[in-house]
Image (spheres, rainbow, N blue to C red):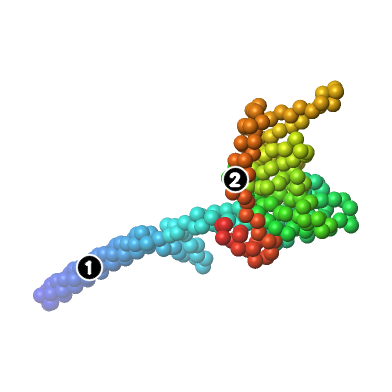
């Protein structure tokens, strides 16, 4: 009987030892599996980060997507587009196509391209339209102006409307024909107020008006006895008549500005080709 009890106790001890070994092995496998899974997730995150792929983090029933890396920078493209749409030529084009207004320094209000008569006169019976246009850098500052040749009440030599761009605004200036004759490609032009008062120069603009910078010119004066005297200037300096006439001849030999008929086709061709 004692032998039977001894074998039962021995068997119970062995069984307990076997069960303990099995339980220990299972726990170790779960720990290894957990470490492996954690390592795999970490590797996936690292690979996704290197590829610039958005990672989604789960939190309960909601999810948030975080951009780990920027794949493409579109700021340069956006900047180029904005620059193009607000450039002087694009703004001029909008005015000429009657999609935007310009500020008339003569009428002192905004006008559209079909209201040029108001830039010329406050008389509503006056008619005015642009028949030609040219694109010239009048101030030699790198930004071109648009010059419209005006026909006013069927007079083809009335004058011009100069459109000038500054800080996103187009300003309009009305110049008479004798103030702005024989425009050259370099932006210089001739002016005349009499047989002994003429020359050539450049125009200067402000937001309110314009002035003519007389480069080479002659001007007449009369004394108390009504005797005329003529003074000559070349490059803003006093000169002889011969020096003045030489400067005038050189000016006349310069290449003239190119004028184009004021048509939709010419406007589109000029401005889109110039971009």
Q: Quadrant of the N terminus?
A: bottom left
Residue 105 horizontal/vertical position (percent): 77, 45
Horizontal and vertical percent position of residue 75: 51, 55
Residue at 57% x, 53% y is 83
Please tell me in which quadrant of the rendered image residue 111 appears.
bottom right
What residue is rendered at 71% in x and 46% in y?
181
- Against 2, residue 40 (above or below) is above
Residue located 89% across and 57% down the image? 125
Most distant residue in the left direction: 3
Q: Is residue 236 left or right of residue 177?
A: left
CB contact under 8 Å: marks 2 and 1: no
Residue 213 lies in what quarter of the image?
A: top right
Which residue is the site of mark 1? 25
Q: Is residue 29 above or below residue 149?
A: below
40 lies left or right of 75 = left
Q: Residues within 10 Å of mark 1 (few under 14, many from 20)?
A: few
Between disc 2 and disc 1, whose residue precedes?
1
Q: Nearer the viewer, mark 2 or mark 1?
A: 2
Quadrant position of residue 57: bottom left
Mark 2, residue position: 253
In the image, residue 186 lies at what x, y percent? 60, 45
Q: Nearer the viewer, residue 241 or 209?
A: 241
Residue 54 appears in the rendering: yes
Q: How many marks?
A: 2
Q: Secondary structure at mark 1?
A: helix
The residue located at (57%, 57%) in the rendering is 274
Does residue 41 appear anywhere in the picture? no
**Mark 2 neighbour class, 10 Å CA radius: few under 14, some 14 to 19, many 20 or more:** few
As rendered, which of 220 and 237 lies closer to the eye? Answer: 220
Q: Quadrant of the C terminus?
A: bottom right
């Amino acid at each position: 009987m004692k032998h039977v009890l001894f074998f039962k106790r021995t068997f119970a001890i062995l069984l307990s030892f076997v069960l303990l070994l099995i339980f220990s092995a299972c726990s170790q496998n779960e720990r290894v599996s957990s470490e492996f899974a954690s390592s795999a997730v970490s590797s996936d995150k690292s690979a996704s980060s290197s590829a610039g792929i958005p990672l989604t983090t789960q939190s309960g029933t909601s999810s948030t997507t975080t951009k780990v890396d920027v794949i493409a920078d579109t700021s340069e493209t956006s900047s180029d587009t904005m620059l193009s749409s607000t450039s002087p030529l694009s703004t001029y084009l909008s005015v000429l196509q009657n999609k935007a207004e310009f500020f008339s320094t003569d009428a002192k209000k905004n006008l559209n391209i079909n209201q040029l008569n108001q830039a010329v006169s406050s008389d509503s019976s006056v008619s005015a339209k642009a028949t030609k246009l040219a694109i010239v850098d009048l101030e030699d500052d790198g930004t071109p102006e648009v010059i419209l040749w005006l026909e006013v009440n069927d007079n083809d030599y009335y004058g011009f409307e100069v459109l000038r761009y500054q800080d996103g605004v187009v300003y309009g200036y009305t110049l008479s024909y004798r103030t702005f004759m024989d425009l050259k490609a370099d932006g210089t032009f001739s002016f005349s107020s009499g047989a002994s008062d003429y020359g050539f120069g450049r125009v200067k603009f402000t937001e309110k008006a314009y002035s003519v910078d007389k480069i080479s010119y002659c001007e007449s004066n009369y004394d108390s006895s009504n005797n005329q005297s003529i003074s000559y200037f070349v490059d803003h300096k006093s000169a002889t008549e011969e020096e003045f006439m030489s400067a005038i001849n050189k000016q006349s030999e310069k290449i003239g500005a190119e004028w184009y008929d004021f048509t939709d086709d010419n406007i589109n061709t000029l401005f889109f080709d110039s971009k």
